[in-house]
Image: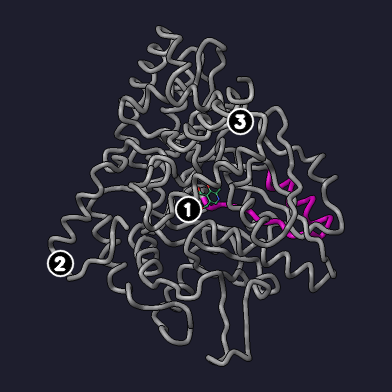
Amino acid sequence: MHHPMPERGAPRDEILASLEAFKERDPRYKEGRVWSLVYYLDEEHQGFLKDAYHLFSSENGLNPGAFKSLKKLETEIISATADILHGSDEVCGVVTSGGTESCLMAVKTYRDMARQQRGVKKPEMVIPETAHVAWFKASEYFNVKIRLVPLTRDFTPDLKKLRRMINRNTVMILGSAPEYPHGTIDPIAEMGEIARRKKIPLHVDACVGGFILPFMEMNGESLPPWDYRVPGVTSISADIHKYGYAAKGASTITYRNLDYLRYQMFVYEDWPGGVFASSALLGTRPGGGYAAAWGALQYFGKEGYRKLAADTLEAVNRLKAGVQAIPGLALIGEPRGPLFSYRSTDPELNIYAVGDQMDARGWQVNRNQSPPGLHAMVTAQHLAVVEDYLADLAAAVAAVRADPELAKQGGAATYGMMAHVPLRGMVKKKILEMYAEQYRAGGAELDIAAGSEEGIGGGKPGLLDRVVHWYVERQSRRQG
Ligand SMILES: Cc1ncc(COP(=O)(O)O)c(C=O)c1O
């Protein structure tokens, strides 16, 4: 065992110093070097969130009747969310621990609703290829089969195919505003019309967009409709811990009315421990997350969020223009919100090698798989580093052009190989094995580089390296 429980406790200030020190090897998000995972403004705001969190860090939202303060915070958060999403007073919802929980709950809700109302025993959901991984996770967890809608040439879901995938087992349709891989806002109005005609619920995953697109629109940006103004939309997930600049652990799932939400609830009336009811996935629900989220909404208000949205959009627009001005690079699809991705249009320019060069220059840039690309989740904080990023990107491209060998090294080699390993089932099994290995209590120092929120494909490819290595060895054993 590497880290047994200490025999005796240590002084608190020493422990806090250790915690600070552990951060040394972490991504440098305070300098705007990280392009996902973190939504950070400054130490002052962070301190405020910390204080708000701290005030409620022991309080438990499990039972809405116990801590009335927390239920008040939840009701006001849901109400503010419904307001910016153009919902009526009928809109209802729950504060969850994050985007994934919100997405999981929508799948459970619509599965159970279809089971009870239509007797659906083999539930299916129709989701675009670009749906966040949370939806694939929900499919596995809740046994709802995925009908995967391919993209058209413009990187939007093929609506003709979507329509044909709907059958009597369909429990829900999904659209995103925007989707994570390319930042495209799915054609929600058209999807809403299909959903309405077929009488199938439509969930909008606005985990990313929920707390920024409304303010971009208030600032005069013309965006396609995607919220409760679209008649077919029955529910929306929107994260406050992303563009709401709250502390981690705060998202919302709202429904057009209680006729949907009630299928999300769990009740067990015969438990020896008492009658039990629960509104979402968690049992104990951390009050700190509610308090920080409520605090953020009160602090910024519409005015503050509009300013953040304006700064973000300025950064996004300048970045997009800068990327497009570099010969050999192009945006993927038509990103309309705060994030975008780009690819190489020149067979001589390996985009993953460009990513490696950006890493070497101190940026933490995520990789896309299909098409191969680099990804940027832009926040207001990034406005200050736009020029540095673009200068380094131009230098990274020049370095890769000057040395074609770079495409055969490092992450570029790994990602290149990864795409060509034909045995996807084996790859999955191998990744699973290696990923699980990291969770051994007695294990060696973890290969922390291997995991990121966007999966092991983000950032530096520690675990992918090992998978590719395994494959190469396997091939040479077979050939030798
Ligand atoms: C579109 C979308 N949905 C859902 C999620 C999941 O959110 P979380 O990481 O908070 O669980 C994300 C995360 O990036 C996302 O981009």
Q: Magenta segment, which residues?
A: 187-207
Q: Quadrant of the N terminus?
A: bottom left
Residue type marked 1: Phe
Query: In x, y percent, where is residue 367?
Result: 49, 32
Counting residues from the N terminus, which is met first, the one under dot 1 or under dot 2? 2
Mark 2 or mark 3, which has the lower sequence index?
A: 2
Q: Amino acid at mark 2?
A: Ala
Q: Is mark 1 within 8 Å of ligand 1?
A: no
The quadrant of the picture occupied by the C terminus is top right
Secondary structure category for the residue under label 2: loop
Identify the residue under disc 3: 370
Q: Point out residue 331 in the picture as x, y percentages from the top left corner.
A: 54, 25
Q: Please determine whether, in this image, residue 469 is positioned above or below residue 147.
A: above
Residue 114 x, y percent position in the rendering? 78, 67
Three-letter amino acid code at the position of disc 3:
Ser
Vertical side of 296 occupied by 444: above or below: above
| Secondary element at tag 1 | loop
Camera-side residue of 236 and 280: 280
Q: Residues within 10 Å of mark 2 (few under 14, many from 20)?
A: few
Picture residue at 29% right of the left edge, 67% below the top: 52
Mark in the foreground, 1 or 2:
2
Instruction: Name which of mark 3 and mark 1 comes first in the sequence.
Output: 1
- 3D distance between C-alphas at marks 3 and 1: 27 Å
Nearer to the camera, 369 or 451: 451
Residue 385 lies in quadrant: top left
> Residue 322, can we see it?
no
Quarter of the rendering containing residue 120: bottom right
Q: In front of the other: label 3 or label 1?
A: 3
Circle number at residue 10? 2
